DNA sequence: TTGTACGCGTTATCAA
DNA sequence: TTGATAACGCGTACAA
């Protein structure tokens, strides 16, 4: 059975009970000035007895530091985002920061609202991985003095650093190799409103085809396993040979499963590349060839950069993560 | 290009610029008393012009309300937990709450530290889904007046509500049906330190076997896809027929893939049941029979309950989620 | 309808 | 080594 502290114990009550002034209690808590060992012990025992915990609110108000950061992501439901989130939190813990999580649910108004709340909350910094937010939105943080690390971006400013992703270069090589083998055209799955990451990759896809004077195919698809699966069941009634580029594992799996259920062989007839690979690339059968970036590492790096940015110690404001081509069973090469 | 508010604008500066007292500004912000429309407009325009945002810190200190909640989970890396997280956040947004996220990483000291920080942070309430925390730990929140909703638990107290999961009953029926078909013994995958949820299910598993005077098998396994896959590759050199109960989809997939790579047929020879089903139960081939609970709904419910608990309006302090048996291709029935 | 003054729980600056 | 006392930015009775 635990004690019952009905009202919050304040520093005053500790001071009174210990027979010292609140200033001394504050000193004991923060180890700021030397306090006579005798009184220090006395104060500590009272703190323990009363179950006193300093109010982070009042501390933050007085010091103008919250030791908390904000995180803006579109949703926690994507595996690659969860991985990044976990990386961020891991470093947060080791650095003593607390984490405020905001999701935009792919809605711009939600994203804007997050910004408002984050500014109100006095976080010491923000990590943004959200395609709803424009560079101007991110600069809004700066105008309120809130340092930002923008993931999947390459914006920089006095208090803004960023972690861009390198997908384009690797993808271009994949496409060129495909051409060199004398293969036919590729199909890119276009997802409406899926954000900058995908559209940048899509642009690289188109660009490479144009440069090589090749035809290509863009296919609209939903960001849903089931819908994509159904769409491809239909499509595979007509199309019997195809190289499909999907932007994440679930979507790639939808194509693979539709191929299997249509009696088409992978990778002989149907090939699939997933852009954002996760551990499910190795679990799903056939395993999925993908462009891999370790999102956990991205999260950790983002937080390290943010801490340095907060302390004005960040030297390189851009840290690029290159993706790696991971050959699995869903493609021939 | 955005304006540059070097220092934080305070309510005082707004008041001065508007030629009113800070009390009036406060009234305008909070819509508390009627303010003459003229002055209200004046104040609002100044607020806009100066880019004033009230300090959540100072507000919280003055009102003793933070409109923020804490969430404790073992990790964000599990799909079912991410789903719950997303449900919580969704309701948080609609209710105007902010979310502080803490992970224990399966470490008790981390979990304890989370409690400390949460109490310091003055959150209005906490949602706990963490097996590291004992009931006494959870009651610690109560002694500091912090309302708690405990997921996967059935503890209640003045300010504690809970959402227990119903896996045992369904599992018993699965096992009994298995017996009734005249099948041999089942194998339960025991994961060390995987928490209460799994051990409760394991107990139900053992119990049911004892009650029916049947043999059973418990196999130790790591909470890792790759290790489990390798272990089962070894095992399937000896064992050629088996019904395996795994606690989540990745582990179940490891068994399924090992079976396939060992030339064993699913579900004719090898059957696999996943306890905590996610959308990957339907994506992975063969699809995985599972005991399903909609974790997104759990998250939403938990938050609804917490809000009611905070407002002293919660009537039923226990809301049980029953799991449902979802037959897929990894089992015969 | 508006303004004054105090309290929220700390830290920090001076003196003592 | 310690103790007053003024911030920190806001809400809110109370008074005007």
Image (cartoon, coloured by chain):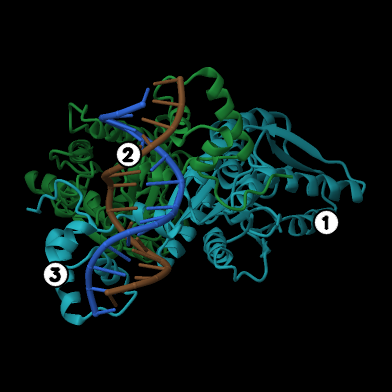
Chain colours: A cyan, B green, C brown, D blue
Q: SS at mark 1?
A: helix
Tell which of B247 and A110 is nearer to you. Answer: A110
Residue at image mark 3: A45
Please name the residue shown 20% across and 50% down the image. A8
Please name the residue shown 36% across and 33% down the image. B300
Q: Is residue A279 above or below residue B87?
A: below
Residue at image mark 2: B63
Is residue B266 at least partly visible in the picture? no
- C-alpha separation, residue under disc 1 versus residue under disc 3: 71 Å
Tell which of A264 and A59 is nearer to you. Answer: A59
Return the x and y of residue A140 as percentages of the image width and height.
64, 45
Return the x and y of residue A171 as percentages of the image width and height.
75, 55
Q: Which mark is residue A176?
A: 1
- Judge depth for marks 1 and 2 and give the one in front: 2
- C-alpha separation, residue under disc 1 versus residue under disc 2: 63 Å
Q: Please state the chain letter of the residue tagged with numbered disc 3 in the rendered image.
A: A
For residue A292, what is the image quadrant?
bottom right
Task: Say yes or no: labels 1 and 3 on the same chain.
Answer: yes
């Amino acid at each position: 059975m635990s004690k019952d502290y009905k009202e919050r114990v304040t520093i005053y009550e500790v001071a009174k009970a210990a027979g010292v002034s609140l200033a001394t209690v504050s000193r004991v808590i923060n180890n700021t000035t030397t306090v006579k060992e005798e009184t220090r012990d006395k104060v500590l025992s009272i703190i323990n007895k009363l179950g006193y915990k300093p109010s982070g609110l009042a501390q933050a108000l007085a010091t103008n530091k919250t030791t908390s950061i904000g995180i803006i992501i579109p949703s926690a439901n994507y595996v690659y985002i969860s991985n990044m989130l976990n990386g961020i939190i891991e470093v947060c813990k080791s650095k003593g920061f607390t984490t405020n999580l905001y999701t935009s649910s792919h809605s711009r108004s939600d994203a804007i609202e997050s910004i408002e709340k984050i500014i109100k909350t006095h976080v010491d910094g923000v990590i943004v991985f959200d395609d709803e937010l424009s560079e101007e939105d991110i600069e809004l943080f700066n105008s309120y003095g809130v340092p930002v690390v923008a993931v999947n971006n390459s914006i920089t400013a006095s208090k803004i650093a960023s972690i861009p992703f390198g997908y384009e270069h690797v993808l271009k090589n994949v496409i060129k190799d495909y051409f060199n083998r004398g293969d036919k055209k590729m199909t890119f799955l276009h997802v409406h409103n899926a954000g900058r990451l995908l559209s940048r990759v899509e642009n690289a896809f188109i660009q490479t085809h144009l440069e090589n004077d090749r035809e290509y195919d863009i296919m609209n698809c939903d960001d849903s396993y089931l819908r994509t699966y159904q769409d491809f069941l239909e499509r595979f009634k007509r199309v019997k040979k195809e190289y499909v580029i999907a932007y994440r594992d679930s979507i790639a799996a939808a194509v693979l499963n539709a191929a299997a259920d249509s009696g088409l062989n992978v990778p002989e007839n149907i090939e699939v590349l997933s852009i954002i690979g996760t551990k499910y690339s190795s679990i799903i059968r056939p395993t999925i060839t993908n462009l891999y970036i370790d999102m956990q590492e991205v999260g950790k790096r983002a937080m390290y950069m943010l801490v340095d940015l907060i302390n004005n110690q960040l030297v390189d404001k851009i840290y690029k993560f290159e993706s790696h081509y991971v050959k699995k069973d869903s493609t021939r090469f």
